[in-house]
Amino acid sequence: MSNRICLSSPHMGDEEKKYLEQTLASNWIAPVGPNIDQFESEIAKLVGVSHVLAVSSGTAAIHLALMLLNVQQGDSVFCQSFTFVASANPILYLGANPVFIDSETDTWNMDPILLKAALEDACRKNSLPKAIIIVHAFGMPAKMAELTAITEEYGVPILEDAAEAIGSKIGEHYCGAFGQYGVFSFNGNKIITTSGGGTLLSNNGISIQRARFLASQAKEAAPHYQHSQIGYNYGLSNLLAGIGLGQLTVLEDRIHARRSNYERYRAVFEKYNAMGYQFQFQEEPSGHFSNRWLTCLLIDPEKNLGLSSQAIRLAFEKENIETRPLWKPLHQQPIFENCISYTNGVSDLLFEQGICLPSGSNLNNEAFNRIINCFDAILEQNAQCGTVAI
Ligand SMILES: Cc1ncc(COP(=O)(O)O)c(C=O)c1O
């Protein structure tokens, strides 16, 4: 069996080892240290925010942001439905109630029309949400101008889940810096990684100072251990921040490689489309710049000789090539079955018809050719049988 081609695997550069060796030599093996300080200030400079806190995961950063926004038991928090579960789990940690908002078809992110309808309803019922979590799915920036205008009308803050979108921007404005709070993830599958880690971003220094306090066990200033509130152990290790510093030196290259993957897939699929297929990609609206974390394809069986994303995924799996369905919308997840949602069918369709293709920045020519050969074989078989045998 050939080597497995993964969806998105870690891709180290030349500097990470140097940072790790220096850190081991200096013995800063702790959740404090110079790498953390530098990592925070480099992220702040990159994105254009004044304050950053490095934490152990993107999920932790979302949890902290919701606490800073004073989300409490029984409050409601609006959240994009088309996302990974970690966008919404922290709402449950706080005993609050998620309300899910569906996507629009251009960016696949939160639909401004549905958001407005949901806010109007909430306002009528005198139950405005404490926050709105907007996601940039697969690195594609959401329609921030429209979404921000609506949230400002109602005075509800935005928590921007930019876990997948480091380096993505609209014009010159970086994702992660649009909302009152922004979050990045440095999980192993992300465009750059610290193996596990995240950052919380804001222009509010006092809030980030409070987040730092909460993330380090809410330890008060005293010679002994003094605690008056619940704290969390959410700090990032100084060792892992060293990996992050190494990874930041290659971020631009990694984005370039991911965008090149997309362009290569697109060129191949345009050839298929010229043969009569109608494969669709996640388009980049004018002015939007996506880091193209994952290249995603939509396959409508009715327009593609009965070929489905599920059949393609299984055929790829037989060749040891990893693909994944797009996010199953959270309003369809059993854990959220009792939550209110505002839907329009868009994320349901994305889930039904979508597939994420291998998109690592370390995808070499040989791997890419294997993927395309596999696709050629699927299409040939499909053309012969009318459907792919699985
Ligand atoms: C959209 C989204 N939000 C939140 C997270 C959570 O980040 P982490 O895995 O670092 O906790 C992830 C990724 O894992 C994600 O893709």
Image: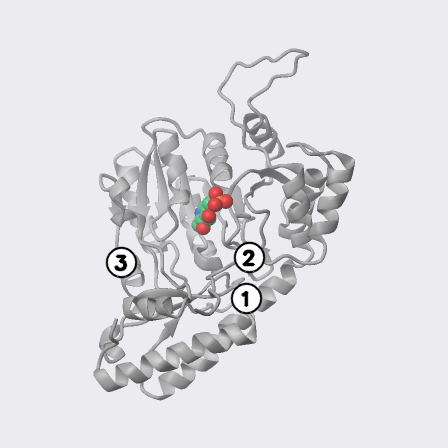
Kind of residue indicated by mark 2: Ile
Residue 323 in the image, given as x and y percentages of width and height: 39, 64
Name the kind of residue labelled 1 in the image: Arg
Callout 1 touching callout 2 (CB < 8 Å):
yes
The x, y position of residue 132, in whole percent, is: 40, 42
Image: 325 above or below 58? below
Of the residues tagged 2 and 3, which is closer to the observer?
A: 2
- Residue shown at 63% from the left, 58% from the top: 251
Structural distance between the alpha carbons of marks 1 and 2: 8 Å
Question: Considering only order in the chain, which callout, 1 or 3, is on the residue closer to the N terminus?
Answer: 1
**Callout 3 secondary element:** helix
Question: Can you say whether 38 is above or below 11 in the image?
Answer: above
Residue occupied by mark 1: 258
Secondary element at image label 2: loop
Front label number (3 vs 1): 1
User: Can residue 361 be seen from the camera position used here?
Assistant: yes
Contact? badges 2 and 3 (CB < 8 Å)? no
Q: Quadrant of the N terminus?
A: bottom left
- Label drawn at residue 191: 2
Residue at 64% across / 48% down in the picture? Answer: 244
Which amino acid is tagged 3?
Asp
Distance in Å between CA atoms under marks 2 and 3 = 26 Å
**Residue ID for mark 3:** 348
> Could one spot residue 277 in this view of the protein?
no
Image quarter for residue 223? top right
Residue 386 or residue 283, whichever sits in front: 386
Q: In this view, does 172 lie to the left or right of 346?
A: right
The quarter of the displayed image where residue 167 is located: bottom right
Disc 3 under 8 Å from ligand 1? The reply is no
